[in-house]
Amino acid sequence: MASGVYQEAWGLVEQIFIDLLDAPSLEIMEDCLKEARRRAKEYRKKLRKEMIEGYKDRANPGSDEAVKQGCLCPRMDNSYGKGCEWADGFVISGGCPIHDKEIKNGNTVK
């Protein structure tokens, strides 16, 4: 999943630079930047939704339900199961009996 995410994000960044380089005036450049911000915000929403949906088969890290099942992932960092605000996913703790396989796959934030 990670390589596809990076490729998609890089494609978005490339398109933003192309749009900026092609802008004939400062006004149009500002419009391009506004559009880039809008597209980046939409991309973050899409990515966040995909990551949160990745836990449909078990409780989200840090949620009340996951903690009842023995989850050791940080509750506040994961907004109590809603996802990590600063990383667009979840922070997974090593040794968590529910989510530790994410770390074994090389991910600390999913």
Image: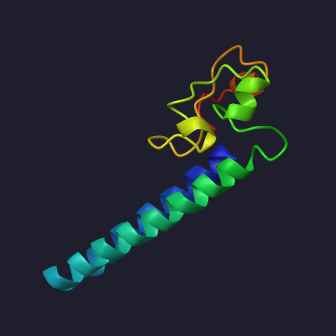
Whether residue 90 appears in this view of the structure is yes
- Does 29 sit left or right of 16 as displayed? left
Q: Residue furthest top?
A: 95
The answer to which quarter of the image holds residue 75 is top right
Residue 67 coordinates in the image, percent (x, y) = 71, 25
- Does 57 sit left or right of 95 as displayed? right
The answer to which quarter of the image holds residue 65 is top right
- Does 39 sit left or right of 108 as displayed? left
Q: Is residue 79 above or below residue 38?
A: above
Q: How is the image coloured?
A: rainbow
Q: Is residue 16 above or below residue 25?
A: above
- Does 79 sit left or right of 4 as displayed? left
Q: Is residue 19 above or below residue 37?
A: below
Where's the C terminus, which quadrant?
top right
Q: Is residue 5 above or below residue 61?
A: below
Q: Nearer the viewer, residue 95 or 21?
A: 95
Q: Residue at x 63, y 31 (%)?
A: 62
Residue 55 coordinates in the image, percent (x, y) = 76, 43
Q: Nearer the viewer, residue 91 or 80?
A: 80
Q: Nearer the viewer, residue 53 or 17?
A: 53
Q: Residue at x 53, y 38 (%)?
A: 79
Q: Residue furthest left?
A: 26
Whether residue 105 appears in this view of the structure is no
The answer to which quarter of the image holds residue 90 is top right
Residue 41 coordinates in the image, percent (x, y) = 44, 64
Q: Residue at x 59, y 62 (%)?
A: 46
